[in-house]
Image: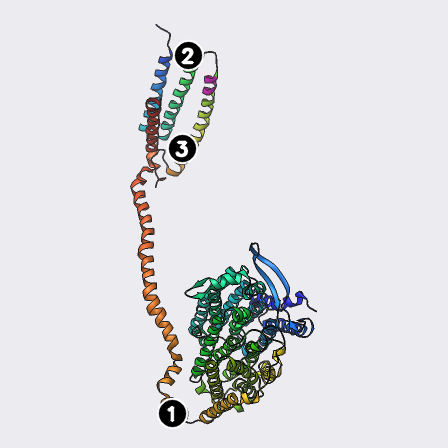
């Protein structure tokens, strides 16, 4: 039954792990910290599954509609009547789905890390950080209040920062974690302003009342929010767009995506958990959380979401085709798939058949978490074996890593959208939603889907086929049971998750959405996907000079894509050349000359005055007595002759 | 030969006061300076007695003040001598010009 105690235990157990291992791990749990963290996570995951079962099958539905349940809520900070920051738990289809995804992937990563990071010096710290991240992410998805979500939003940012910088003796990791933190923080400023705008006009921070206030056209809050405008765009749209900017920063949407590829400096299981399956979809989750407001009140803001998503998906797919670091390929692939989720939300409407995009987006989030985590963990196994991230060091690994090979292949088929693997179903729904809503986005998505198949199989063939690996001395196999079990479990998920009738559980208005399957419609994407796969096979199955020739014939386009369209360089140019020179240096000059000058002036003047009058304090007793006498005589004269 | 009046006493008191002040400024020996301070105090005592006798002959306030001042002067002398002894221990001298460290 619905019981707030065990639901609140789901995030609190990882937090307990963080506190325990963070404070005492290095001293008392040097060798057992992994087991402790994994054990707590296991309990948390079981509770999450139990909650999901209860919600979807027992108490979640009322009159055929999934309700938004608030089993726990207390006022944390009260600013005034009606305006308070509450801490609470919300159970609705998306938060329950995210609970399952986060705890399951986190559990897999916990188990996998037991093998992957064995013998690592800061093992307890690593598990402490994982616990902190899991706690923050679970808190984020269950937030009942927009400010609560912001708090947890920053907490996941911090834990992501800590985990990217886990190898803090590597300068590139340090640079990457700073970059990730600064870029997402920069985006979060937009989020915060968006929160302030939305809560100012709706007069509340609570999600339920905020959504209710801003979606009914009769309410006075809605009217003021729509009539107030700035630069010709209504305040409501500004608020939503700014909230989306925060989401875009966290979800690595163009043009705020630059931190994600660099974030691959972290340990690979961390990339699987944070930068593929859970944290980076927080932006999608945020838009989904506020979806009624986007869809009903501000179609303009929603189309911004759609176009940003589609452009990100497309650009990332092109860049992914040219990268040679396998983790970077996966990072761009992640960005591309999140772009899919974003534009799926963007093309969706609210309620009934129109809400197909919403369901599809959440469905893709779910399946993507499975196969992308699997891809990263598989890549981790490969890196563990080869000790390199570069494609050119790999090849022919199918003989050495049979389990990794099979599971990686399943994940590649899933992401490429080959039936009957999970990615096929979710991608079909997204394409269908886009087709009915916006043809331009549909065509971009279709090309992206072909590119996705191509770059994933480029990766697959380069790692597992291509040239034969020279047998080198110390083979330590695939990495033991702890690393293989998550791969197998996730592979089962990636293969079978598509058969879940997702529309029955998650839809924009909580009602059951029947997702029809159109065979004729799915011919085009599947055919394009297969074409991409065969092209990759033709180019990369065995070692040839075809890739170089094709790259050379593409010339500038290849070079631009290889350099990630020079977006990093553009950022550097803007920050170093423009912001530093035009704002930073004048500000530094002002600080050094004017501010410091004033302070120094005050100091110097005081010193000068002190130098001149310090002679009064000579240490000579009789001189003091003389001052005293003169004073007394002066007073006497004053009293006798002046103030008679 | 007339009876000495208030003005005679005040004159003596003033003379004592200025002798004390003069001594305080010219002597370098701390003990002598202390003695000069005692002269100043006694000139005040003399003032009190004189005013009491000539202005309010039926009252004793001035006399009591004098007794208090004598008691306090004794205590003050004890403290001052203690300070002087300590100074001698640390400086091997009670010359006021050798004790000038306590300055800016």
Whether residue A477 is visible here, answered yes or no, is: no
Q: Secondary structure at mark 1?
A: helix
Could you say where residue A602 lies in the image, as x and y percent from the top left?
A: 33, 48
Query: Pointer 3: what residue?
Result: B84
Q: From the viewer's perspective, is A320 left or right of A610? A: right
Chain for numbered disc 1: A
> Residue extending furthest top?
B1
Distance from disc 1 to disc 3, alpha carbons, whole Å, reads 103 Å
Query: Pointer 1: what residue?
Result: A549
- The disc placed on residue A281 is none
Split into 4 quadrants, where in the image is the C terminus of chain A?
top left
**Foreground tag (2 vs 1):** 1
Label 1 crowd bin: few (<14), some (14–19), many (20+), radius 10 Å: few
Q: Are marks 2 and 1 on the same chain?
A: no
Is A356 included in the stretch rendered in magenta? no
Could you say where residue A396 lies in the image, as x and y percent from the top left?
A: 49, 91
**Foreground tag (1 vs 3):** 1
- The disc placed on residue B54 is 2
Distance from disc 2 to disc 3, alpha carbons, whole Å, reads 39 Å
Q: From the viewer's perspective, is A625 left or right of A351? A: left
Note whether A49 is above or below A478 in the view shown. Answer: above
Chain for numbered disc 2: B
Could you say where residue A364 lies in the image, as x and y percent from the top left?
A: 55, 79
To which quarter of the image does residue A642 belong? Answer: top left
Question: Toward the viewer: A317 or B67?
Answer: A317
Question: Marks 3 and 2: in contact by CB < 8 Å?
Answer: no
Question: Marks 3 and 1: in contact by CB < 8 Å?
Answer: no
Q: Which residues are magenta?
A: B61-66
Q: Are marks 1 and 3 on the same chain?
A: no
């Amino acid at each position: 039954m619905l019981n707030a105690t065990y639901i609140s235990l789901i995030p609190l157990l990882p937090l307990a792990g963080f506190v325990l291992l963070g404070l005492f791990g290095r001293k008392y749990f040097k060798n057992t910290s992994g087991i402790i963290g994994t054990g707590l996570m296991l309990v948390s995951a079981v509770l999450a599954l139990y909650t999901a079962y209860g919600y979807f099958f027992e108490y979640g539905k009322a009159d055929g509609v999934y309700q938004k349940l608030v089993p726990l809520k207390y006022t944390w900070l009260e600013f005034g009547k009606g305006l308070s920051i509450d801490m609470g738990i919300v159970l609705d289809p998306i938060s329950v789905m995210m609970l399952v995804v986060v705890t399951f992937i986190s559990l897999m990563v916990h188990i996998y890390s037991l093998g992957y990071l064995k013998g690592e010096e800061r093992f307890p710290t690593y598990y402490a950080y994982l616990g902190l991240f899991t706690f923050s992410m679970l808190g984020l998805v269950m937030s009942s209040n927009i400010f609560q979500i912001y708090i947890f939003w920053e907490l996941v940012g911090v834990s992501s920062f800590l985990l990217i910088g886990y190898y803090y003796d590597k300068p590139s990791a340090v640079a990457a974690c700073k970059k990730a933190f600064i870029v997402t923080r920069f985006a979060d400023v937009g989020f915060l302003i968006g929160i302030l705008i939305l809560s100012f006009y709706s007069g509340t921070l609570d999600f339920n009342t905020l959504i209710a206030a801003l979606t009914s056209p009769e309410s006075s809050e809605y009217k003021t929010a729509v009539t107030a405008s700035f630069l010709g765009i209504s305040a409501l749209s500004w608020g939503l767009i700014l909230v989306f900017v925060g989401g875009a920063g966290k979800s690595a949407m163009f043009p705020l995506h630059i931190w994600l590829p660099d974030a691959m400096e972290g340990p690979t299981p961390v990339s699987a958990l944070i930068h593929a399956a859970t944290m980076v979809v927080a932006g999608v989750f945020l838009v989904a959380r506020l979806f009624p407001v986007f869809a009903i009140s501000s179609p303009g803001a929603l189309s911004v979401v759609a176009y940003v998503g589609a452009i990100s998906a497309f650009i990332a797919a092109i860049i992914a085709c040219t990268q040679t670091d396998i983790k970077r390929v996966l990072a761009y692939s992640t960005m591309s798939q999140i772009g899919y989720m974003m534009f799926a939300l963007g093309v969706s409407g609210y309620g009934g058949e129109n809400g197909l995009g919403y369901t599809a987006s959440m469905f893709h989030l779910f399946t993507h978490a499975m196969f992308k985590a699997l891809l990263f963990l598989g890549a981790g196994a490969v890196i563990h074996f080869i000790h390199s991230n570069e494609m050119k060091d790999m090849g022919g690994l199918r003989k050495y890593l049979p389990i990794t090979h099979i599971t990686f292949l399943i994940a590649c088929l899933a992401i490429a959208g080959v039936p009957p693997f999970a990615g096929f179903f979710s991608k079909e729904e997204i394409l269908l939603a886009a087709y009915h809503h916006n043809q331009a986005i549909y065509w971009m998505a279709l090309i992206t889907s072909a590119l996705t198949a191509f770059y994933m199989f480029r990766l697959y063939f380069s790692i597992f086929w291509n040239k034969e690996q020279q047998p080198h001395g110390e083979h330590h196999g695939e990495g033991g049971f702890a690393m293989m079990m998550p791969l197998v479990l996730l592979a089962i998920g990636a293969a079978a998750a598509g058969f879940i009738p997702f529309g029955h559980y998650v839809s924009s208005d909580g009602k059951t959405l029947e997702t029809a399957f159109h065979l004729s419609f799915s011919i085009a994407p599947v055919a394009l996907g297969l074409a991409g796969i065969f092209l990759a096979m033709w180019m990369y199955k065995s070692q040839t000079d075809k890739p170089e020739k094709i790259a050379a014939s593409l010339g500038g386009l290849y070079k631009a894509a290889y350099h990630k369209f020079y977006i990093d360089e553009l950022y550097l140019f803007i920050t170093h050349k423009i912001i530093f020179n035009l704002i930073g240096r004048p500000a530094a000059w002002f600080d050094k000359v004017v501010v410091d000058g004033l302070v120094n002036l005050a100091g110097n003047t005081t010193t000068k005055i002190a130098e001149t009058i310090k002679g009064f304090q000579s240490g000579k007793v009789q001189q003091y007595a003389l001052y005293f006498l003169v004073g007394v005589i002066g007073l006497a004269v004053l009293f006798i002759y002046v103030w008679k | 030969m007339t009876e000495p009046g208030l003005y005679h006493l005040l004159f003596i008191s003033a003379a004592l006061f200025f002798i004390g002040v003069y001594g305080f400024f010219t002597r370098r020996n701390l003990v002598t300076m202390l003695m000069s301070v005692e002269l100043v105090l006694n000139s005040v005592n003399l003032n009190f007695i004189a005013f009491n006798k000539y202005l309010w002959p039926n009252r004793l306030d001035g006399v009591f003040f004098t007794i208090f001042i004598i008691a306090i002067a004794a205590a003050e002398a004890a403290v001052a001598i203690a300070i002087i002894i300590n100074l001698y221990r640390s400086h091997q001298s009670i010359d006021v010009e050798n004790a000038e460290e306590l300055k800016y």
